[in-house]
Image: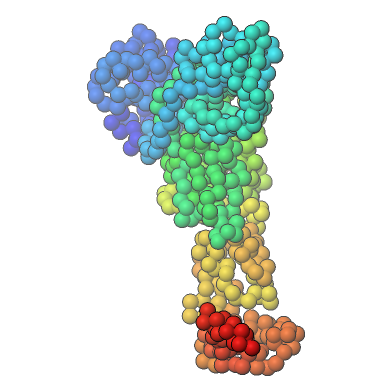
């Protein structure tokens, strides 16, 4: 039995015999000592069985999600903790393959008992200050109706068909929104053509003189303008509600929802950030901009050599987690180790219960879950070997997590994404291709081991899942997901190699890959070592006691800061994955003997660099026409200053300082002039 199930009371129900559910076989698959009692109507006439389980004081798990509100209400009445829930009906039992779905049921129940690490929370506060933005009489009516529940201000982009009210119960302005920032409880809106209504408005609105760049703050925004959303995508910004003015039902729904947005609200901190390993920039030289490029809400902004992530604005899409090469931006809802732990628990339980050819269907907890439900209610349901795996957002998947799932036994990973996210899936497609590259090059075959399915039609999803041949089995290589993102990724990739029995040593990767080497043009490199101080990942090192440029390939994240820092343009990047031991050890990219100061003997640069400078300047520049002047180039900083001070043309040497003329001097000169 899974450790997660120990001490839990598991209640299962065949939902009035609409599922083929054998309590004895399910108990055996779960490793339980006693046979499970299969209820037929746990939520109605057998509700006392649930009450008895809750009254026992042990943690309870109910294999039903449809009646979760009822079970939660009963537990609250009894003063007990709400149970955990798992859906074995829509996800397994309600399917044409329901009779063979017992291994999947066991896997889903075991996974549901997994205890992840807690996620941090941030608090947003709204006092109900609401901006209604729209046109005409409709926007005016909406604002007036909301005014009894919220503190409303109305801004009309067009007031031509609105009638001034007999009693002005909301402040009314004209204007157009030029820009909006912020989130729930802290929006800042900029208006152009902003003007208050004149009190003398009679049969039509009249306004004062308009002003541009007028700024205003509010907690909530209801946008019924019909224009382009103020935020892209609008649904990702807490506190911003948008409805098509041509759809009265949508407007009414938005009005209903926005009235509940008063008070304090806890929101998960979706992403944690570690500036110490961020590869964004060093000394003003920009390298990695991956997270900035993919963030759809503008929650990530440059902050010197690092970035700043605003948890209040972050919508939790997780794309930054997927593309960050170092793990500086890391998803925390759930944490990486918990996500892999859940997947490993699911796959292990499925295999232990006799399941074969597992396909992990990764979907989001909203649209994806509804599609799964629709397939089970109106179609063939999920195949028996397809294991649904819900996330807050599928866009947070990176190659590290996909590789970890396959290494843990998944024959295929299908990522089901909503078309509403289509414009935000570039990073997911790239990460899937990177994972597929590893698996293809390691010998897992040409068949796609990972697929991104962007679809909202349940029939199309169902056809794809049923018609795609079962994947070629893979050998599970379990591992503990401990360490940084790169540690876990490298471990998962190594496990893939072991599982395939591959002897591949080098794999060429796409340009966006976060693995590779740095190539140095030794003819151009002067060993100034600017790249060493710029490298954020300690991949480039100096030679300590020798004049060397060294490199640890395993550390390189291909951020490109070294390339942009190099004054000689001597560095190029080569994306690849190196399995050889040399990747973990320093190798010498360039070296030279130090140039000794001709005056004191102190080494102060590379011989090649100094010789090159002398060759370029000697006899070709007016400052270095003589051998004596050229000798200065062969001296260290201290000796060069001393030598210049000793020379007759020392630019810092000053002549005799003339005496300053005083008032007495002028008086004496005048007296002498008078005498003459």
Write the residue at 55% across / 14% down: 143
Q: Residue furthest front?
A: 675
Residue at 58% from the left image edge and 13% from the top image edge: 199
Q: 34 or 672: nearer the eye?
A: 672
Above/below status of 545 relative to 452: below
Where is residue 493? Give x, y as percent.
53, 52
Quarter of the picture containing the N terminus is top left
Quick one: quadrant of the C terminus?
A: bottom right
| In the displayed structure image, the side of residue 30 where residue 434 appears, left or right | right
Count of numbered badges drawn on the protein = 0
Q: Position of residue 336 (x, y in %)?
A: 46, 44
**Residue 617: percent from left, percent from top:** 71, 84
Let me know if residue 408 appears in the view: no
The residue closer to the viewer here, 308 or 350, is 308
Where residue 572 appears, x then y in whole percent?
Answer: 66, 64
Residue 191, compared with residue 528, is above or below; it is: above
Residue at image position (33%, 37%) is 3
């Amino acid at each position: 039995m899974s450790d997660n199930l120990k001490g839990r009371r598991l209640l299962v129900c065949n939902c009035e015999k609409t599922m083929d559910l054998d309590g004895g076989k399910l108990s055996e698959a779960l490793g339980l000592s006693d046979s499970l009692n299969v209820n037929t109507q746990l939520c109605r006439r057998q509700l006392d069985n649930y009450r008895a389980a809750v009254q026992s004081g042990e943690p309870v798990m109910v294999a039903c999600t449809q009646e979760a509100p009822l079970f939660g209400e009963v537990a609250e009445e009894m003063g007990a903790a709400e149970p955990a829930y798992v859906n074995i009906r829509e996800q397994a039992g309600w399917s044409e393959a329901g009779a063979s779905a017992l291994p999947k049921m066991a896997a889903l129940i075991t996974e549901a008992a997994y205890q992840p690490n807690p996620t941090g929370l941030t608090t947003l506060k709204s006092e109900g200050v609401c901006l209604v933005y729209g046109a005409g009489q409709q926007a005016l009516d909406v604002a007036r109706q909301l005014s009894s529940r919220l503190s409303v201000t109305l801004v009309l982009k067009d007031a031509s068909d609105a009638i001034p009210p007999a009693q002005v119960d909301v402040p009314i302005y004209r204007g157009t929104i030029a820009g909006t920032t912020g989130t729930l409880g802290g929006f800042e809106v900029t208006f152009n053509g902003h003007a208050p209504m004149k009190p003398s408005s009679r049969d039509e609105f009249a306004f004062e003189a308009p002003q541009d760049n007028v700024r205003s703050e509010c907690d909530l925004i209801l946008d019924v303008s019909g224009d382009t959303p103020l935020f892209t995508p609008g649904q990702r910004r807490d506190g911003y509600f948008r409805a098509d003015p041509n759809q009265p039902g949508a407007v009414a729904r938005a009005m209903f929802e926005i009235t509940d947005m008063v008070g304090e609200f806890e929101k998960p901190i979706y992403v944690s950030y570690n500036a110490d390993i961020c590869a964004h920039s060093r000394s003003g030289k920009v390298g990695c901009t991956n997270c900035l490029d993919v963030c759809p809400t503008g929650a990530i902004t440059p902050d010197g050599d690092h970035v700043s992530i605003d948890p209040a604005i972050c919508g939790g899409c997780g794309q930054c987690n997927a593309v960050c090469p170092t793990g500086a931006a890391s998803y925390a809802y759930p944490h990486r180790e918990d996500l892999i732990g859940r997947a490993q628990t699911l796959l292990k339980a499925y295999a232990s219960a006799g399941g074969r050819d597992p396909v992990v269907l990764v979907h989001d907890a909203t649209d994806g879950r509804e599609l799964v439900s629709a397939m089970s209610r109106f179609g063939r349901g999920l195949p028996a070997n397809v294991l649904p795996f819900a996330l807050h957002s599928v866009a947070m998947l990176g190659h590290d997590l996909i590789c970890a799932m396959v290494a843990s036994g998944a024959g295929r990973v299908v990522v089901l994404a909503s078309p509403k996210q289509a414009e935000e899936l570039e990073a997911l497609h790239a990460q899937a291709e990177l994972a597929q590259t590893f698996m293809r090059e390691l010998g897992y075959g040409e068949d796609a081991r990972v697929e991104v399915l962007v679809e909202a039609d349940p029939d199309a999803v169902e056809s794809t899942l049923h018609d795609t041949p079962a994947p070629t089995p893979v050998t599970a290589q379990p591992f503990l997901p401990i360490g940084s993102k790169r540690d876990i990724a490298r471990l998962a990739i190594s496990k893939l190699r072991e599982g395939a029995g591959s002897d591949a040593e080098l794999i060429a990767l796409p340009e966006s890959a976060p693995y590779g080497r740095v190539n140095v043009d030794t003819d151009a490199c002067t060993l100034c070592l600017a790249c060493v101080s710029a490298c954020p990942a300690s991949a480039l090192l100096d030679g300590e006691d020798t004049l060397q440029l060294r490199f640890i390939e395993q550390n390189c994240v291909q951020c490109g800061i070294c390339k942009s820092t190099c004054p000689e343009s001597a560095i190029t990047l080569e994306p690849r994955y190196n399995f050889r031991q040399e990747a973990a050890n320093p190798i010498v990219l360039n070296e030279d003997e130090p140039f000794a100061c001709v005056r004191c003997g102190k080494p102060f640069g590379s011989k090649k660099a100094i010789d090159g400078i002398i060759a370029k300047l000697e006899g070709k520049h007016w400052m270095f026409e003589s051998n004596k002047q050229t000798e200065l180039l062969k001296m260290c900083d201290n000796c060069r200053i001393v030598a210049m001070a000793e020379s007759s043309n020392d630019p810092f040497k000053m002549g005799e300082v003339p005496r300053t003329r005083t008032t007495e001097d002028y008086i004496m000169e005048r007296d002498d002039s008078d005498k003459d």
